[in-house]
Image (cartoon, rainbow, N blue to C red):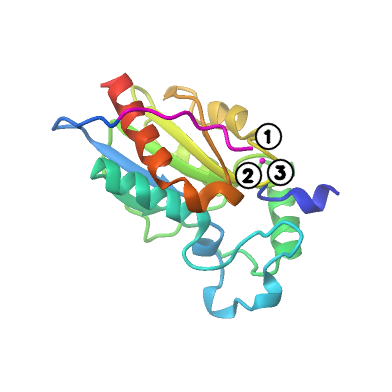
Amino acid sequence: MFRRHFILSALVIPTFPTIVLGSGRKILVAYYSWYDNTFQEQIRPSDIDATTSASLQAPGQVTIAARWIGEATAAQVIPILAKEPYPVNYDDCLDQAIDEKTRKYRPALSSRQLFPEFDFLFLGFPNWSYTLPMTVCSFLEMLPAKGKIIAPFCVHGTGGLARTSAELRRCARNAKILPTLSINRDDLAHSEQTVKEWALYALKQTF
């Protein structure tokens, strides 16, 4: 059963009033998506896991949520890309994710990665083998995290947030980390307004 809970958790999203943003805030939306980190030209229907519904359809599920946040906050939206793509086959990708987690391996980021300065980071990711994708850890550990605020959001299935929040705190020790927005992938299609309201509320509470 362990193999069948890769990128998987319950929707826990409150509803908040719409907030109008001020100016001069350096806000960035960075996210990790399996779709953006694999060999897209090799994707076949058979590579999408039927049991978990782990998706390789474009755009990725975390990508969708990230774009909504970018629209709501007028922030730049940038994918976190590993230097080496992951397999398109679900089981092969899961095996690699488990191996990286076990070894605490930090994949190199793509040389194309350019992240602007920011004060506030919306950070999106899936639940990979009950924790963060290790590429997200690579990204966090290269940041000058002191004084930064991170608002995490996670798109998942039945595995929930699992250990993603604990791993995030370990990888960004000097940042202020807000509670993670938990989005069940089955509810994602109907969550645009809630995700946008959450993003605006998070900014209002910290600026």
Residues shaded magenta: 9-17
Q: How many marks?
A: 3
In the picture of the structure, the residue carrying the numbered disc 2 is 127
For the C terminus, the quadrant is top left
Q: Using the image as rendered, state which of residue 181 and residue 105 is in the foreground.
A: 181
Question: Residue at the spot x=39%, y=33% of the render?
Answer: 198
In the picture of the structure, the residue carrying the numbered disc 3 is 158
The amino acid pointed to by label 2 is Asn
Q: Main secondary structure of the magenta part?
A: loop
Task: Evaluate if marks 3 and 2 touch, with contact meaning CB atoms under 8 Å apart.
Answer: no
Point out the frontmost of discs 3 and 1: 3
Q: Quadrant of residue 54?
A: bottom right
At which x and y percent is residue 85? 56, 65
Query: Is 79 covered by the magenta stretch?
Result: no
Task: Evaluate if marks 2 and 1 touch, with contact meaning CB atoms under 8 Å apart.
Answer: yes
Question: Residue at the spot x=50%, y=53% of the render?
Answer: 189
Numbered label attached to residue 162: 1
At which x and y percent is residue 105? 64, 46
**Element on which disc 3 rests:** loop
**Element on which disc 1 rests:** loop
Relative to residue 149, is residue 88 drawn left or right?
Answer: right
**How far is the residue under mark 3 from the one under mark 2?**
10 Å
Label 2: few (<14), some (14–19) or many (≥20) C-alpha neighbours in 10 Å: many
Q: Using the image as rendered, state which of residue 92 and residue 1 is in the foreground.
A: 1
Name which of mark 3 and mark 2 comes first in the sequence: 2
The amino acid pointed to by label 3 is Thr
**How far is the residue under mark 3 from the one under mark 1?**
10 Å
Relative to residue 165, is residue 101 drawn left or right?
Answer: right
The amino acid pointed to by label 1 is Ala
